[in-house]
């Protein structure tokens, strides 16, 4: 408690000193509430953040009157911050805080705070010129020095994300990251490179930036993100080629497992999916022709989720039609390894690639077998008036008609079903 002498006046300077002492006392707890380690507490000058935020907005003031946890809750959700209420000094403090959070605590919140604080600070020319003069003296062009510094600072949080995201590349060699930070960094780069897939908060933050700033952020984020998947897939390609040449299914399955791990860490990245679709078909065909069904089944287990994800994207994006046939063939392999879901898997294959020869043949055979089973169930004899018999015969006919449309060539399974229908007096051209 501060003691005051009798008759002494409480000055503005005293009030400012009290606030400063309170802000310094808040700094450690605030950093902890933001997820930072005790040994990484920012230096005392970082307490200036609290003074710069004070009075900017009722929401901020209420948090400052409560406790450090309340303020941390706002800072960790940057989309809730009243960005346009902050003055230049507050933006500068927030930008530096965001930079520190990227390295020591919350990657996603840190990069958003840093990125948008630096972007808005770039418009504060008077403040920047003053900072530049203090740093470089009254030399001519100090305002340009400030602008260049901010532009570099604006790229820095993205490049930090890129450095963290690159820790995903060694997954291709079987080395998993020691934390979730690289995966979060990659996800954030994905959001920033394509805000249409990002949460609403990022879209809101992007709306505050100029078109030039948005394009710049998207361009650099995309470059950094693509570099990670490109380099990781290049390593995987070498591993897959070595495994294929050795004719060792276990080595190949190990490489595919690593690719699957990379796909999961990159939040279902499309480039990893297309890589798997293009690079693994030959291996699967080899197992199939050699009747090595156990490793083929394990292959299908590993590839299933990436394949289904890519299949959905192919259906939604006509520009990805080049991958339709590869996806369909991988689904055909799965349909043979898992007969209990054969029809559903083949239906998906045909939605992706209606002209796929193997998918059409396998679906025709499935329908032919189903028609034969229906006709066996109803037993021999005339058609009669039984509702069950008539519905089964009608269903068998419809299956056989579709099978012939898919596969008009001679096929024993289809011929057998057609002959069974004929014995019941049912023509494929007429209703029973």
Image (cartoon, rainbow, N blue to C red):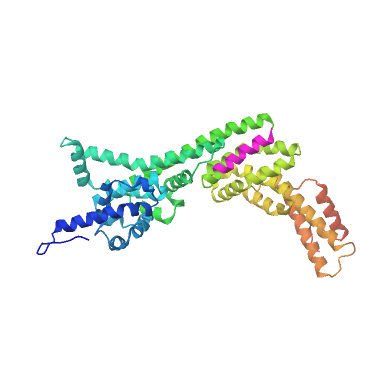
Would residue 33 be seen by someone viewing this image from the given angle?
yes
Please state the horizontal and vertical placement of residue 171, each as a whole percent of the image. 54, 38
Residue nearest the viewer, comparing 225 with 31? 31
Would residue 86 be seen by someone viewing this image from the given angle?
no
In the image, residue 414 above or below residue 292? below
Q: Residue at x 77, y 50 (%)?
A: 365
Majority secondary structure of the magenta segment?
helix
Would you say 410 lies left or right of 144 here? right
Would you say 274 lies left or right of 378 here? left
Q: Residue at x 37, y 52 (%)?
A: 32
Quadrant into which the N terminus falls: bottom left
In the image, residue 116 above or below residue 8? above
Residue farthest left in this picture: 7
Quadrant into which the C terminus falls: bottom right
Residue nearest the viewer, comparing 246 with 101? 101
Please state the horizontal and vertical placement of residue 177, each as a whole percent of the image. 50, 41
Please state the horizontal and vertical placement of residue 429, each as a whole percent of the image. 79, 58
In the image, residue 282 above or below residue 421? above
Residue farthest right in this picture: 381
- Magenta part of the chain: 248-262
Please state the horizontal and vertical placement of residue 34, each as a whole percent of the image. 38, 53
Would you say 331 lies left or right of 41 here? right
Q: Residue at x 30, y 40 (%)?
A: 151
Q: Does the magenta segment cover residue 153?
A: no
Q: Residue at x 29, y 46 (%)?
A: 43
């Amino acid at each position: 408690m501060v003691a005051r002498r009798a008759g002494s006046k409480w000055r503005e300077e005293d009030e400012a000193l009290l606030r400063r002492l309170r802000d310094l006392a808040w700094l450690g707890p605030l950093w902890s509430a933001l997820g930072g380690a005790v040994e990484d507490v920012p230096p005392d000058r970082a307490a200036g953040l609290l003074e710069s935020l004070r009075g900017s907005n009722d929401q901020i003031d209420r948090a400052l009157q409560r406790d450090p946890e309340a303020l941390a809750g706002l800072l960790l959700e940057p989309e809730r911050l009243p960005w346009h209420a902050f003055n230049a000094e507050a933006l500068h403090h927030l930008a530096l805080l965001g930079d520190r959070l990227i390295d020591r605590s919350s990657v996603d919140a840190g990069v958003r705070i840093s990125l948008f604080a630096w972007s808005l600070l770039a418009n504060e020319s008077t403040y920047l010129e003053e900072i530049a003069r203090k740093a470089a003296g009254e030399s001519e062009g100090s305002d340009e020095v400030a602008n260049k510094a901010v532009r570099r600072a604006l790229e820095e949080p993205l490049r930090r994300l890129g450095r963290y995201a690159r820790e995903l590349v060694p997954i291709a060699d079987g080395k998993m990251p020691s934390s979730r930070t690289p995966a979060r960094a990659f996800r954030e780069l994905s959001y920033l490179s394509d805000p249409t897939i990002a949460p609403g908060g990022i879209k809101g933050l992007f709306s505050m930036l100029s078109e030039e700033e948005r394009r710049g952020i998207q361009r650099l984020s995309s470059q950094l993100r693509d570099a990670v998947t490109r380099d990781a897939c290049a390593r995987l390609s070498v591993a897959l080629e070595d495994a294929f040449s050795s004719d060792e299914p276990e080595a190949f399955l190990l490489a595919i497992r690593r690719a699957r791990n990379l796909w999961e860490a990159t939040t279902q990245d499309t480039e990893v999916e297309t890589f798997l679709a293009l690079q693994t078909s030959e291996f699967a065909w080899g197992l199939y022709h050699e009747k090595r069904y156990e490793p083929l089944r394990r292959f299908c287990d590993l590839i299933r989720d990436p394949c289904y994800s890519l299949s959905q994207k192919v259906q939604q994006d006509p520009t990805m039609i080049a991958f339709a046939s590869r996806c369909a063939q991988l689904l055909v392999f799965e349909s043979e390894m898992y007969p209990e879901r054969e029809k559903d898997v083949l239906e998906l294959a045909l939605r992706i690639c209606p002209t796929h020869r193997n998918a059409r043949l396998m679906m025709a055979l499935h329908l032919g077998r189903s028609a034969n089973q229906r006709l066996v169930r109803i037993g021999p004899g005339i058609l009669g008036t039984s509702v069950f018999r008539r519905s089964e015969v009608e269903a068998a006919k419809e299956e056989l008609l579709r099978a012939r449309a898919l596969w008009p060539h001679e096929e024993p399974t289809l011929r057998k079903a057609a002959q069974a229908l004929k014995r019941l007096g049912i023509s494929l051209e007429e209703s029973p």
